[in-house]
Amino acid sequence: MSIFEYNGSAVVAMVGKNCFAIASDRRLGVQLQTIATDFQRISKIHDKLFIALSGLATDAQTLYQRLVFRHKLYQLREERDMKPETFASLVSALLYEKRFGPYFCQPVIAGLGDEDKPFICTMDCIGAKELAKDFVVSGTASESLYGACEAMFKPDMEPEDLFETISQALLASVDRDCLSGWGGHVYLV
């Protein structure tokens, strides 16, 4: 079993018409043993920017603390919030500088940029970005999430349709992965 699969996870982000949704499961486990059923993988950076961290839970919490620190420094220096593209570059650089002893996390970043244009991307543990115009997935349930999202996604969905689509895709996928599950958290912006 890979270290990325140790705690189990399922994370997905989708874009709609001037909106985005990001969702994750709630299970925290140690291999096949469930430890908690209310684990929070999605974190708010500011009102229009969220990050979800799949992978090893301890590394995810450490990485999140470092990202919050860097964002606060940026706010003090620039007197504004970070754009999603800038934040993705920050996360990528932070992961790449630890490439020889990496954080065992795969971040999913979702945010609204200029003119409320949705931005989503995911990365591997050394910061290689994968940008997408429709959806991105991460975690132990990523294979089944890809299938569910491919089947259910439609371009330019309204917020209500986007919420329903991402929720159904997440629930259908975690049913096919024993390392993730116990419902989900969905954020719609």
Image (cartoon, rainbow, N blue to C red):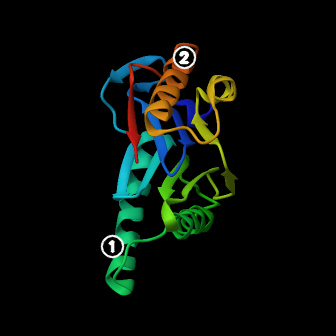
Q: Residues within 10 Å of mark 2 (few under 14, many from 20)?
A: some
- Spatial CA distance of label 2 from label 1 is 37 Å
175 relative to 65, above or below:
above
Q: Residue at x 62, y 32 (%)?
A: 2
Say which quarter of the image contains residue 101: bottom right
Residue on which the image places disc 1: 72
Residue receiving disc 2: 172
Mark 1: which amino acid? Lys
Q: Quadrant of residue 95?
A: bottom right
Residue 103 in the figure: left or right of residue 186: right
Chain-order first, disc 2 or disc 1: 1
Give the SS element for disc 1: helix
Q: Residue at x 48, y 60 (%)?
A: 116
Name the front one of labels 2 and 1.
2
Relative to 63, 134 lies left or right: right
Horizontal side of 129 relative to 173 (left or right) equals: right
Q: Residue at x 43, y 33 (%)?
A: 160
Percent across and percent down for residue 22 are 47, 41
Picture coordinates of residue 143, whole percent (x, y):
67, 26
Q: Is residue 70 visible?
A: yes
Q: Is residue 124 above or below residue 23?
A: below
Task: Determine whether label 2 and label 1 are within 8 Å by CB.
Answer: no
